[in-house]
Image (tube, helix red, strand yellow):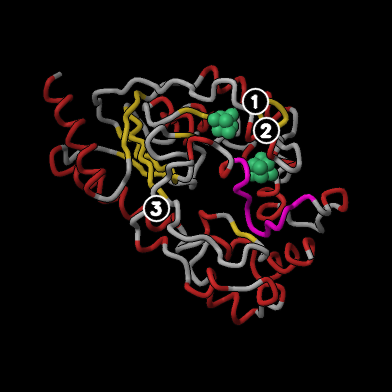
């Protein structure tokens, strides 16, 4: 057991060395409680057009179905809180997570290095890393690994890093020493629920994605519904309101990941420049950004909607 404990410490040290802000480990288990909540969420259709959220149910609640013989989930956090925000306060907003390069590649690269580190000691370890790329309940695993709790706004909140963090996982078939889940520190606070302009947090810990600005500006593929007109508060890709108001984000420190630094023009763009954004400029400014997900036409649709 002592060997397992010290190797688990080494994994966490290596994760920090690779630039992750935190790392925790939990045992692979069937997510019984979460399975019934998820089933309810799916049955009530709260996922809207995100049909992929309703699929792969068995894998979602049991990582053993993704990695044969899976024993441990190693969860990592990577801070993306930016040093600066957009200069023109009247300009359309994009979510902070999309300021820099698409995070998938950055985190996959680091997780792959973490897996290689483990294989130096245990060459036969079988494992896979995940970052939004497969049906893994990342927030649940991060909370079980002691990295934070799932707040009333349904984001993972870390006491040390706040909620502007990406979550990744490495699922492996090696037994390790496990962490204790974090407590819920939301208390009596309801700031996120009160601040949401569309009432998408329908009750504490329950998000109706069909009302969320993030969903409309990124996932929704049709013409935006007229009843949402005037409610987007300048957001054209994602929405950070329920995180910006969270007291646990008051002391966020800026990230030190060069790949997350924004294109300099993004920070400088005035309101007028945003509304006159050409396809050529879109391609340059968002070259490696998650904003590419909406394509130029989607971003234009969102801009027209808030104009
Ligand atoms: S992201 Fe915006 S719209 Fe969605 S729940 Fe949070 S505050 Fe509401
Ligand atoms: S704003 Fe308050 S209630 Fe909402 S997630 Fe943060 S601490 Fe929890």
Residue 51 visible in the current orientation: no
Q: Is residue 239 magenta?
A: yes
User: Pointers 2 and 1 in contact (CB under 8 A)?
Assistant: yes
Image quadrant, ligand 2? top right
77 or 6, which lies in front?
77
Residue 94 visible in the current orientation: yes
Tell which circle, 2 or 1, labels the residue nearer the N-terminal end.
Answer: 2
246 or 13, which lies in front?
246
Image quarter where the N terminus lies is top left
Kindly state the secondary structure of the residue where label 1 is placed.
Answer: loop
Residue 254 tag number: 3
Q: Which residue is mark 1?
A: 204
Q: Horizontally, is 62 left or right of 192 in the view?
A: left
Q: Position of residue 141 (x, y in %)?
A: 43, 30
In the image, the residue with mark 2 has its CB under 8 Å from the nearest atom of ligand 2: yes
Q: Position of residue 86 (x, y in %)?
A: 56, 64
Tell which circle, 1 or 3, labels the residue nearer the N-terminal end.
Answer: 1
User: Pointers 1 and 3 in contact (CB under 8 A)?
Assistant: no
Residue at 72% x, 51% y is 216
Q: Which residue is mark 2?
A: 193
Q: Residues within 10 Å of mark 1 (few under 14, many from 20)?
A: some
Q: Position of residue 231 (x, y in %)?
A: 78, 50
Kindly state the secondary structure of the residue where label 2 is placed.
Answer: helix
Q: CA distance from mark 1 to mark 3?
A: 28 Å
Magenta range = 231-242
Looking at the image, is mark 2 or mark 1 nearer the viewer?
Answer: 2
Q: CA distance from mark 2 to mark 3?
A: 25 Å
Tell me the quarter of the picture where residue 276 sits.
Answer: bottom right
In the image, the residue with mark 1 has its CB under 8 Å from the nearest atom of ligand 2: yes
């Amino acid at each position: 057991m002592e060997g397992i404990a010290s190797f688990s410490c080494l994994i966490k040290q290596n994760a920090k060395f690779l630039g992750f802000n935190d790392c925790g480990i939990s045992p692979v288990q069937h997510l019984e409680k979460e399975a019934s909540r998820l089933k309810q969420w799916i049955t009530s259709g709260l996922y809207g057009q995100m049909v992929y959220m309703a699929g792969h149910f068995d894998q979602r609640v049991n990582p053993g179905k993704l990695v044969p013989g899976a024993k441990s989930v190693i969860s990592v956090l990577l801070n993306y809180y930016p040093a600066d925000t957009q200069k023109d306060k009247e300009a359309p907003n994009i979510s902070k997570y999309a300021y820099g390069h698409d995070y998938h590649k950055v985190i996959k690269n680091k997780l792959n290095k973490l897996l290689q580190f483990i294989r130096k000691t245990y060459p036969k370890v079988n494992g896979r890393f995940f970052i939004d790329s497969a049906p893994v309940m990342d927030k649940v695993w991060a909370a079980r690994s002691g990295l934070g709790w799932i707040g009333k706004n349904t984001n993972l909140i870390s006491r040390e890093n706040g909620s502007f963090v990406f979550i990744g996982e490495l699922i492996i078939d090696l037994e390790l020493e496990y962490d204790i889940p974090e407590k819920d520190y939301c208390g009596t606070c309801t700031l996120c629920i009160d601040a949401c302009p569309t009432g998408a947090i329908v009750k504490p810990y329950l998000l109706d994605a069909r009302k969320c600005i993030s969903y409309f500006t990124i996932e929704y593929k049709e013409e935006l519904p007229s009843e949402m007109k005037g409610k987007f508060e300048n957001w054209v890709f994602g929405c950070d309101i329920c995180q910006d108001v969270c007291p646990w984000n008051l002391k966020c420190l800026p990230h030190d990941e060069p790949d997350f630094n924004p294109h300099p023009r993004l920070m400088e763009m005035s309101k007028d420049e945003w509304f006159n954004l050409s396809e050529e400029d879109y391609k340059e400014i968002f070259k490696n950004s998650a904003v590419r997900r909406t394509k130029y036409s989607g971003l234009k649709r969102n801009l027209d909607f808030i104009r």
